[in-house]
Image (cartoon, rainbow, N blue to C red):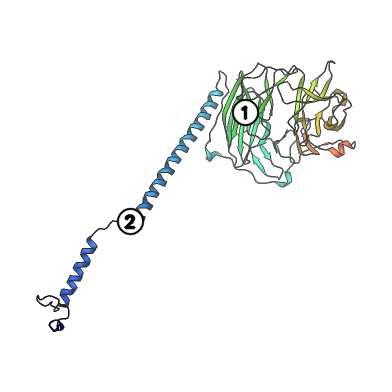
């Protein structure tokens, strides 16, 4: 054992290990070892940066593809709608549909508000549209108007031109004064109450198109008889009068086939729609020269479900139903000595009667609520009818519209 006592760490008989290393040599060895370890490329179990880059590339490719597909679908849809509308409105005559944005630099500027000249309800006077709140918008590029309604989402107006030798026009007028022509040279033009659709006569056809923004799209047409004209929208269908000189209407639903054969031979005029969808109209009777009021089913037959033959009615077809379906404001016949009549539709029946409401109606009837209506008389003066007053024996009188010259004929704005 003694032979091993003097040995500390060398267990062999070889030469003793030298511990004489200079500091610079030790530093060089450490540097070399570390550099060798850094040079060795060891694969990582996961590459977060690479994964993030690859994920971003995939998301970008998907978004780009979706955007291109959506753009292509939109382009095809709009192109198809425009092409169809353009083809639907072409004929041998002069009817033209113009869809586009004219030079924005030529837009007229709206005039300042004039609260003192604000009539109620809103109306068009000459080339100026006056809102109920007093705002006035000049319409320099719009001809004589026959009907005005607000656009579906606001921001402007649909204006139907009066009949002329060049046909009728349909304009869209935006609140900033931009005027665009949607239809030119058309026959009768009818707007849906919500302004989402328009129907018009073009040559031997009847067409219906949707109103989207400031454009007409998706036109559908059907051949119609020579004297047939659209009267009003009934839901998504169009009520068509086949001959103004005789009784009879039919309902056409666009896209559901041609114009149906007229099975109704009694209805003379249709004044409006009840909340349940049924119609209020004037029907002929077996007694010559006598007509009755009737509630009609909204089908091709237009069957009367309830009639009232008491009031003496004018054959002009002018009238309007209150929003709740309770009242009908209509022109009376010769026996009423030139008066408009107020009829209680809830009491429509064999003993139906009417009370005098005011002077004869010219143009549209605008109900502002369930008991208040307004219209213009034959001189262009404004008549406001209060149901309570009329039933109490106090018919409304006509009053001049403030700020309107005597030779101007205002047009009431409907569709509110």
Horizontal side of 257 relative to 380 (left or right) equals left
Disc 1 from disc 2: Cα separation = 74 Å
* Residue 66 at x, y percent in the picture: 45, 40
> How many residues crowd mark 2 within 10 Å: few (<14), some (14–19), many (20+)?
few
* Residue 234 at x, y percent in the picture: 69, 28
For this rendering, which residue is in front, 270 or 340? 270
Horizontal side of 383 relative to 8 (left or right) equals right
Among the two numbered marks 1 and 2 on one chain, the one whose residue lies closer to the N terminus: 2
**In the rendered image, which quarter contains the C terminus?**
top right
Q: Are marks 1 and 2 in contact (CB under 8 Å)?
A: no
User: Which of the 4 image quadrants contains residue 187?
Assistant: top right
- Disc 1 marks which residue? 169
Residue at (15%, 74%) from the top-left corner? 25
* Residue 196 at x, y percent in the picture: 63, 34
Front label number (1 vs 2) = 2
Horizontal side of 346 relative to 84 (left or right) equals right
**In the rendered image, which quarter contains the N terminus?**
bottom left
Which disc number belongs to residue 45?
A: 2
Q: Is residue 57 above or below residue 301?
A: below
* Residue 333 at x, y percent in the picture: 84, 24
Res 152 visible? yes
Q: Is residue 240 above or below residue 28?
A: above
User: Which of the 4 image quadrants contains residue 223?
Assistant: top right
Residue at (74%, 18%) from the top-left corner? 264
Residue at (86%, 39%) from the top-left corner? 388
């Amino acid at each position: 054992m003694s032979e091993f006592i003097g040995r500390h760490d060398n267990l062999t008989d070889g030469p003793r290990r030298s511990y004489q290393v200079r500091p610079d040599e030790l530093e060089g060895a450490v540097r070399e070892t570390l550099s060798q370890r850094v040079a060795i490329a060891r694969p990582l179990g996961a590459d977060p940066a690479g994964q993030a880059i690859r994920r971003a590339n995939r998301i970008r490719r998907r978004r780009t593809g979706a955007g291109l597909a959506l753009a292509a679908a939109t382009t095809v849809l709009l192109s198809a709608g425009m092409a169809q509308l353009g083809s639907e409105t072409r004929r041998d005559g002069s009817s033209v549909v113009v869809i586009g944005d004219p030079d924005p630099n030529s837009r007229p500027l709206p005039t300042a508000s004039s609260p003192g000249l604000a009539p109620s309800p809103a109306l068009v006077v000459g080339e100026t549209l006056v809102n109920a709140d007093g705002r006035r918008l000049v319409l320099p590029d719009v001809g004589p108007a026959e009907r005005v309604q607000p656009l579906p989402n606001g921001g402007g107006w649909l204006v139907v031109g009066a009949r002329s030798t060049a046909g009728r026009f349909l304009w869209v007028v935006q609140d900033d004064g931009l005027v665009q022509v949607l239809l030119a040279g058309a026959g009768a033009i009818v707007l849906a109450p919500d302004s989402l659709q328009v129907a018009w006569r073009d040559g031997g056809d009847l067409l219906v198109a949707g109103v989207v923004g400031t454009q007409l799209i998706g036109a559908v047409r059907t051949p119609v008889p020579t004297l047939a004209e659209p009267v009003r929208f009934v839901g998504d269908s169009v009520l068509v009068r086949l001959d103004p000189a005789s009784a009879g209407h039919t309902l056409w639903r666009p896209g559901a086939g041609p114009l149906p054969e007229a099975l109704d031979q009694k209805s003379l005029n249709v004044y409006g729609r009840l909340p349940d969808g049924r119609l209020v109209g004037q029907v002929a009777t077996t007694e010559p020269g006598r007509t009755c009021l009737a509630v009609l089913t909204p089908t091709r037959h237009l069957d009367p479900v309830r009639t009232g033959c008491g009031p003496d009615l004018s054959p002009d077809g002018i009238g309007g139903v209150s929003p709740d379906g309770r009242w009908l404001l209509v022109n009376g016949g010769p026996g009423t000595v030139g008066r408009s009549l107020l009829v209680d539709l809830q009491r429509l029946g064999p003993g139906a009667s009417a009370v005098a409401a005011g002077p004869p109606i010219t143009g549209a009837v605008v109900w502002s609520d369930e008991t208040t209506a307004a219209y213009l008389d034959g001189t262009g003066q404004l008549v406001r009818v209060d149901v309570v007053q009329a039933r109490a024996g106090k018919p409304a009188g006509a009053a001049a519209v403030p700020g309107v010259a005597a030779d101007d004929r205002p047009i009431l704005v409907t569709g509110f």
